[in-house]
Amino acid sequence: MQQPSPPSVAILDWMMPELDGVDVCRLARQRAGLESLYIILLTSRESEEDIVAGLDAGANDYITKPFGRRELAARIGVGERVVELQRQLAQRVTELEAALGKVKTLQGLLPICSYCKKIRGDNNYWKQVEGYIEDHADVSFSHGICPDCYTSIVEPQLAELEAELAPKNRPGDA
């Protein structure tokens, strides 16, 4: 019975009762949830054919007996780092897929009115540029007045308004 949370690194001997380490490697690579299991095959078999067979079966690393404890500990550390990097990569891929699912893009030719700058969108409906872009891209707008428009439009309007609101000098007023 498989545990709910399988180990991240496994050390298998080639020679085991019932199933040998190579068979366990093959089965682990076929089983869902064990794809990222880092398998170290530990054996006295040291021929090139055996090493290739073990790695082809799905082992990530291969150590021949006799082995040193420090070497085994170092290889386990490598396996843990590889598993952690795979986990981080899988997380980043998931985040990227989620982000791509949210992205809206503007593509193609946009018919725009030469006078009012409205854009003809879906169903021949004309919309202000801001509304069209908000509907088709992941953006929001804040409005302001650029310096050129302030000088050429707003200042004259303010001057005109001030002139209208200023008290008019009437004859006889002192």
Image (cartoon, rainbow, N blue to C red):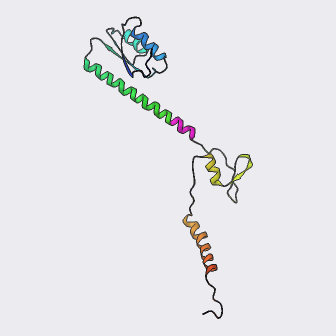
Residue nearest the observer in this picture, 105 or 37: 37
Kindly indicate the quadrant of the structure image that contains residue 108: top right
User: Who's the residue at 64% across and 86% down the image?
Assistant: 168
Counting from the top left corner in percent of width and height, residue 35 is at: 46, 21
Residue 110 drawn above or below residue 145? above
User: Who's the residue at 56% across and 57% down the image?
Assistant: 142
Residue nearest the observer in this picture, 139 or 6: 6
Counting from the top left corner in percent of width and height, residue 152 is at: 60, 70
* Count of number-bearing discs: 0
Magenta residue check for 160:
no
Magenta residue check for 97:
yes
Question: Given the current orientation, which residue lies at the most extreme right position?
Answer: 124
User: What segment is highlighted magenta in the picture?
Assistant: 96-104
Counting from the top left corner in percent of width and height, residue 119 is at: 68, 52
User: Who's the residue at 40% across and 12% down the image?
Assistant: 54
Residue 78 drawn above or below residue 56? below
Residue 117 drawn above or below residue 40? below
Quadrant housing the C terminus: bottom right
Residue 112 drawn above or below residue 99? below
Kindly indicate the quadrant of the structure image that contains residue 105: top right
User: Who's the residue at 71% across and 46% down the image?
Assistant: 122
Q: What is the magenta segment's predominant secondary structure?
A: helix
Quadrant housing the N terminus: top left
Image-based side of 113 in relation to 39, left or right? right
Question: Given the current orientation, which residue lies at the most extreme top position?
Answer: 18
Counting from the top left corner in percent of width and height, residue 48 is at: 36, 10
